[in-house]
Image (cartoon, rainbow, N blue to C red):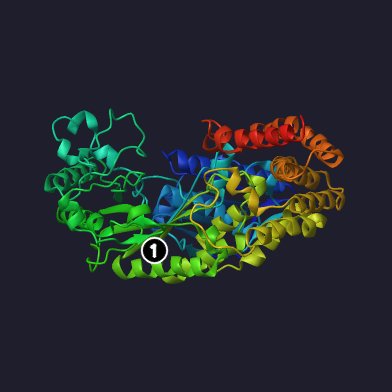
Amino acid sequence: MRQYRTLTLADRGQPRTAIIVPAGAGEILRDAAGELQTALEKMTGMAPPIGADGGKPAPRGRTAIHVGLTTYARSLKLDAGYAGVEGYRIHTAGRDIFILGGSDSGTAYGVFGLLEDHLGARWFMPGELFEDIPIQTTLKIAPINETRTPDFLFRVFSGIAGLEGHRWERRNRVSSRRHELPYAGFHHALYKIFPVAEYGKTHPEYYALIDGERLIPESDAVSNGLFGQPCTSNPEVVDVTIAATRAYFDEHPEAHCFSLGMNDNGNFCLCDNCRALDIPDLKFRDRPIYSDRWFTYFNAVARALQESHPGKFVGCLAYHNVEEPPRRIERLEPNAAIYLTQDTAQHLDPEYRDKDREFILSWLEQCDHVCKYDYYGLGWVLPRYFAGLMADDIKFQRSAGVKGFYAEAYPHWPAAGPQIWLASKLWWDAGQDPAKLLDEFFSRLFGGAAGEVRAFYDRLEAIWRRPREGRWFQGLRGLHDQVPCYTTDDADALEAMLSRAYKATRDPLVRLRIDYIRRWFAFPATLIRGWHGADELLNLPRGPEAGRKAADLRKLRPRLKKVHHQAVLEDRNMPKSAYFNDGRYEARVADPWTEKVDEALAHAGG
């Protein structure tokens, strides 16, 4: 078959290619073909047709892009090779380009690999405003023969909201959350195995014994945060878990991993048999550690599953009271996977960082399949930006042999966009240079204003990395623990940077992007100024100076509602359910802020 030096996809705005999808293709492949068609239309000005799977090569003078295993690909005996579940192969034969994945998702990532790596398209944040697709009315590419596999086999964010957010994930090759992915089962799940309706009255001994009573929820409707851990030393509890695990794989033979993740609380059984398996008085982060009893139970289930369903896995979180590796268990079973929960934002403290890394390495000595569960968002409404710390951590995890990443992102995109995009790139290929990736992010989105916008985010990270002791989940409980990271001078300086960035360009598209960030930053800036302003006023005696400060503070009260609306409620990409829809915003942010401001105004005489 003749090899061409270049393949023409468009000539002076006229399509010279067709997109071919296998007959009977599913939704994932059809969507990927549609995305390819749309991107090529934006590049060249004309949409290439999506043609029928006719089993023939591209006609003379034309190019064909095959999205998946078409009839012609089968006739050439092509496949994805060693790409794995989410990897892909792009192969050119004659005038035909074949994109073949280890799964439909892998094929879709191959489409975006073609667009990103070979045609220069970028999707930096959700929505058209933050995409950058080069316009080339004549579009040619060289032949391709590559196989790409992600460095981490599982790459999932939680809290990427909305249709545009999910498109952004696909375009940046972030894993979908399908249960057949490697290591996909690990989250809080034991409450599902021991429903109160089935076992609450018939087997109360299955539930945690605390203060002499069995902790049995009133119903299965309670959250898993209130559903205590089962009595894992009870042999019948082990048998019930084994049966549930086997039944799951019988019903879902395509699945890879079943979750034995602990319920989200510290209510562990204190019966004599459970406590006999613990290391006495062992603590970490001021929490008692129950890892030996827990992983004795976990290993028993894994061992039984390996006998009945070889190749299938059980997974769990190494979290809270089971964060440490067990001391009396030499090694977990070969079909065990754990997700170690760590807050990389706290790596501003080198001692904290080194302890986290020691934990990862110790877990890797005891478990063949270790993944990381991180907290990039953690419910902060003030900026929590640590792109450099995050990039260093991802590179370390890759070098150590960690297999997957799950991050609670829930991003305020103007606050965290560069960091979240950077994570998506490094999760796929950790060998990339983070500085060069961020250069691309800022230069392609902000042109002549890139320097000022980057200075804004660099200042955010410098503020975050001010020396202090690392503290697990810092700021989760509310504004009182977030504001001390920022000063009023910080808010002033950051706003000035955004103002200079806006003035540094006359490009209307760039100004819209900068204005998106400015509208959002008015919200945290108001919170910072109001909180610190109230503190200052509370320390002043009544008088003219207190009156002036009170007048300034009084203006911020109605402003908070306005900027919250424009920064949060009007932003379709904001993960509102995680921050603002269940009363958490009022309880942790708005109410404490208003109470503090009102207290200060009352102190100053109204």
Q: How many marks?
A: 1
Query: Which quadrant of the view contains residue 469?
Result: bottom right
The one of 123 and 376 positioned closer to us in this rendering: 376
Question: Could you tell me which secondary element the residue under label 1 belongs to?
Answer: loop
Q: Position of residue 239 (x, y in %)?
A: 14, 46
Which residue shows up at 61% across the image and 68% down it? 433
- In this orientation, which residue lies closer to the viewer: 511 or 296? 296
Q: Disc 1 designates what residue? A: 82
Between residues 387 and 207, which one lies in front from this camera angle? 207
Residue 90 on image: x %, y %: 50, 59
Q: Amino acid at mark 1?
A: Tyr
* Apparent side of residue 16 relative to residue 194 in the rendered image (left or right): right
The crowding category of the residue bearing disc 1, from other C-alpha atoms within 10 Å (few below 14, some 14 to 19, many at least 20), is some
Visible in this render: residue 592?
yes
Q: Position of residue 556 (x, y in %)?
A: 76, 35
Image quarter hosting the C terminus: top right
Residue 224 or 514: which is nearer the viewer?
224
Q: Is residue 46 left or right of residue 301?
A: right
332 over 178 or under it: above or below = below
Q: Is any part of residue 92 visible from this angle?
A: no
Q: Is residue 153 above or below residue 263?
A: below
x then y, percent, for residue 272: 16, 51
